[in-house]
Image: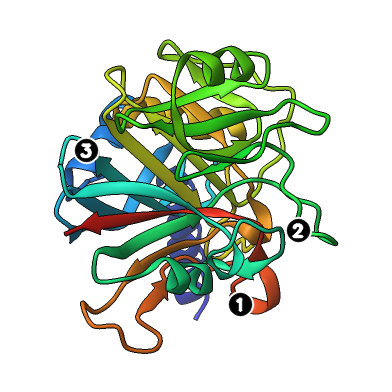
Amino acid sequence: MKNIQQFTLILMVGVLLSNCNDKIDYNNHYEAIPKTPVGTKLVENTDLIAAIHSDSTYKVTEGVQATEIAYTSMKGSAMKIFIFEVDLNKASVDMKVSMPNGANTYGMQPMTEQAVYMDSEDHMVWAGFNADFYNMSTGIPRGPVHRNGLVVKANFDSGDRGIFALTNKKKALVATRNEYPEIAKKLKLQEVVGGGPSLLSEGNVLVQTDQTVEPRTCVGISADSTQVYVLAVDGRNFSYSTGMQLEELATVLKALGATTGINLDGGGSTTFFVRNTPHFSDNRFTVRNWPTDNGGKERAVANGVVIISKN
């Protein structure tokens, strides 16, 4: 019996020593394997993505592609982003500013409802996104608004602000509040919405004082002013998507091909929607992202931009 006990003790010690000598790998083995051209650009040109969980692209209409990517960031955060690529070289494609009820008056209305008032056989709305920050009591936007060449509002309130605009020659641009008056004199600005701080200038990511992580909407533009990149980032939900800092937005826009960019309203206002049918049926617009208000309910906003096809 004594020999058996000694043997058992020796065996247990051996097992314990063996386990102590085993090397335990505490590193998570993530792989960022993109499936789309957009996903490839982000993996190759940024250091934001640790692992991609889903990556899909679909055609919205001629000249407009949408990409949706779910990933784990290098910070270990869950992320979900949505991207429109709009080719303004396509004759049929255009972008228009929307306001509540299709009128040039201030108010607040969900983007999919604003889209209904902009939608027609001749100007079919295929997609859209929210735009300027605004007074949440009155619906007055914080920056300028031009619609179809008409100046609805030409001033800014306080803060680091700018514009996203299209000229009458269908060239896109972004500008700071200081640049806006001179640009408005020189160019025929057809569509204008206000925004927040500039994100990119001449291809350079701009340093930001705001380092908060939030749901975001932003726009980037190519050097030749013909390609528009719209980025919507969901946030405030740690298990689904955390959100981005402003400089991270700029990094994504630059990777996509933008040289200039501007931040738009975010938080619960962030809205990314597409048309789900060519027919003019009720509920023909679907919000693809997850607005943070009321568990995904679309927020009423002051204005936005819709992407249309012209017959």
Q: CA distance from mark 2 to mark 3?
A: 39 Å
Q: Residue at x 35, y 32 (%)?
A: 168
Q: Could you tell which of marks 1 and 3 lies nearer the N-terminus?
A: 3
**Of helix, strand and loop, which one carries label 2?**
loop
Q: Could you tell which of marks 2 and 3 lies nearer the N-terminus?
A: 3
Left-right relation of 112 to 211: left
> Residue 57 in the image: x percent, y percent?
21, 56
**Residue 11: quarter of image:** bottom left
Q: Amino acid at mark 1?
A: Lys
Q: Amino acid at mark 3?
A: Thr
- Tell which of 215 and 140 is nearer to you: 140
Circle 3 residues within 10 Å: few <14, some 14–19, many ≥20: some
**Residue that carries the numbered disc 3 in the rendered image:** 40
Left-right relation of 182 to 137: left
Q: CA distance from mark 1 to mark 2?
A: 18 Å
**Of helix, strand and loop, which one carries label 1?**
loop
Circle 2 residues within 10 Å: few <14, some 14–19, many ≥20: many
Q: Residue at x 57, y 70 (%)?
A: 101
**Of helix, strand and loop, which one carries label 3?**
helix
**Residue that carries the numbered disc 2 in the rendered image:** 139
Q: Is residue 300 visible?
A: yes
